[in-house]
Image (tube, rainbow, N blue to C red):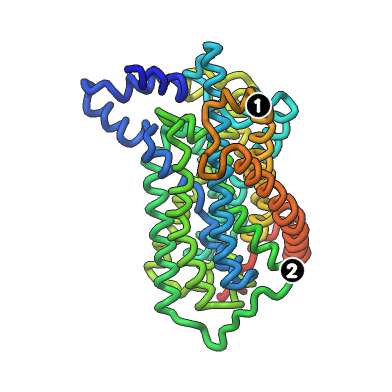
Amino acid sequence: MASEKVETVIAGNYVEMEREKGDSSKPTKSKLSTLFWHGGSVYDAWFSCSSNQVAQVLLTLPYSFSQLGMLSGILFQLFYGLMGSWTAYLISVLYVEYRTRKEREKVDFRNHVIQWFEVLDGLLGKHWRNAGLFFNCTFLLFGSVIQLIACASNIYYINDNLDKRTWTYIFGACCATTVFIPSFHNYRIWSFLGLMMTTYTAWYMTIASLIHGQVEGVKHSGPTTMVLYFTGATNILYTFGGHAVTVEIMHAMWKPQKFKLIYLIATLYVLTLTLPSASAVYWAFGDALLTHSNALALLPRTAFRDTAVILMLIHQFITFGFACTPLYFVWEKFIGVHETKSLIKRALTRLPVVIPIWFLAIIFPFFGPINSTVGSLLVSFTVYIIPALAHMVTFASSSSRENAVERAPSLLGGWAGLYSVNIFVVGWVLIVGFGFGGWASMLNFVHQVNTFGLFTKCYQCPPHKH
């Protein structure tokens, strides 16, 4: 009993959710709805993290390998995977700290989804909140844009009767339906399906490349230039920086303090998908990938490839919802309807958020290069630098360290070790991710604009055969 009490203080008391969970006398319809719709377990969080972390990026990682070379590609994936898990751990620590402090003040979060900027506000004040809000919202906005671009890029490989821009219009309308999904609890079945889809696609890419074998006269000349090298590295930084929605996924758990290791386990699983697929496709096609940022473009058209394209399309729709839902929450809070019970009212007020995303996807349809640009300029701050700095500032005083809900891991040598890792993360990402990565990916991005132009109708399309 006493341990339950402690758990409640640390984890937050989800009264209405626990009631939902514990009531066994519910009719079958309600049980089915719980099975597919109301997720809050450790497994739900793991599915959400894994399926959200690698979506369309899976298709651009071979492109990054062609820029980096095989060895650097593998090492950067392992390195950024670990670093991403570390900062996700920091975010979870700050969330539990904020939540516990607020609940000691008797704040009730029953109809309120806690977001990252609110954690920063509660722990560090309004300047931190504003920085967090700016970077997080901009990153999620472009994250949603990238999903839309990816939809158009993929469907084109099944049906090229319409150009990619027209497909973007169509998928923008389809993705707007995510306004009806209330919160991350309701992604239970989608997260599970999403992970199955990326798993299929990754292994299809691996096996199809090995069966296809190396193309005639294949060259593996990467890395050739600094610009391409750092562009590739930044795409991988982007891949493992998918935890801008970490706080919202944690908030959807019955016991958020169990989140700490979930992200690391999710990353380890994701590495079993990204390493074999990127290595195999690069081995088979080599430098051809430099002009084909979507790996599916090079694989021969078969029923298996078409299945992969369709599954990735559905998955991108899910990931669009993942990236956009926090934006919907911010918008709801801004106009004052966040705690409204009416789903229809909330859905209608969310629609204006989709319009700028749609517009940006039509202006910048550069699938691949846009990932690196977003990675260097936004992901670097949103999910690496700000969480590490915020953690150091929050626990700067000895009293805050003594009263911390989550102790520093003794494995790292306590607080001194934790601060050393944080300083390294901030330094590395600032210099390599933001500095070199920003410079390289902006040059590459400008090159794409100059080559193809804004509002280009069909990015990287082969000449149309009539």
Q: Spot the residue most to the top.
A: 106
At 72% from the left edge and 24% from the top edge, which residue is drawn? 126
Q: Is residue 224 above or below residue 216?
A: above
**Which of the 4 image quarters holds residue 450?**
bottom right
Q: Which of the two labelled residues, at mark 1 and mark 2, occupies the earlier sequence position?
A: 2
Direction from residue 34 to residue 94 in the image, left or right: right
x, y percentage for residue 322? 51, 41
Direction from residue 350 to residue 27 in the image, left or right: left
Work out whether residue 46 or residue 198 is closer to the camera in this orientation and state it. Answer: 46
| Dot 1 amino acid type | Ser
Q: Disc number at residue 197?
A: none
At 62% from the left edge and 54% from the top edge, which residue is drawn? 237
Q: Residues within 10 Å of mark 1 (few under 14, many from 20)?
A: few
What residue is disc 1 on? Answer: 398
x, y percentage for residue 402? 58, 25
Q: Is any part of residue 167 visible from this angle?
A: no
Work out whether residue 329 or residue 41 is closer to the camera in this orientation and state it. Answer: 41
| Dot 2 amino acid type | Met
x, y percentage for residue 317? 49, 47
Element at label 1: helix
Q: Is any part of residue 427 visible from this angle?
A: yes
Work out whether residue 93 or residue 447 is closer to the camera in this orientation and state it. Answer: 93
Query: In this rendering, which labeled residue sits more in front, label 1 or label 2?
Result: 1
x, y percentage for residue 83? 58, 50
Element at label 2: helix
At 75% from the left edge and 54% from the top edge, which residue is drawn? 431
At 52% from the left edge and 16% from the top edge, which residue is drawn? 103
Q: CA distance from mark 1 to mark 2?
A: 44 Å
What residue is disc 2 on? Answer: 226
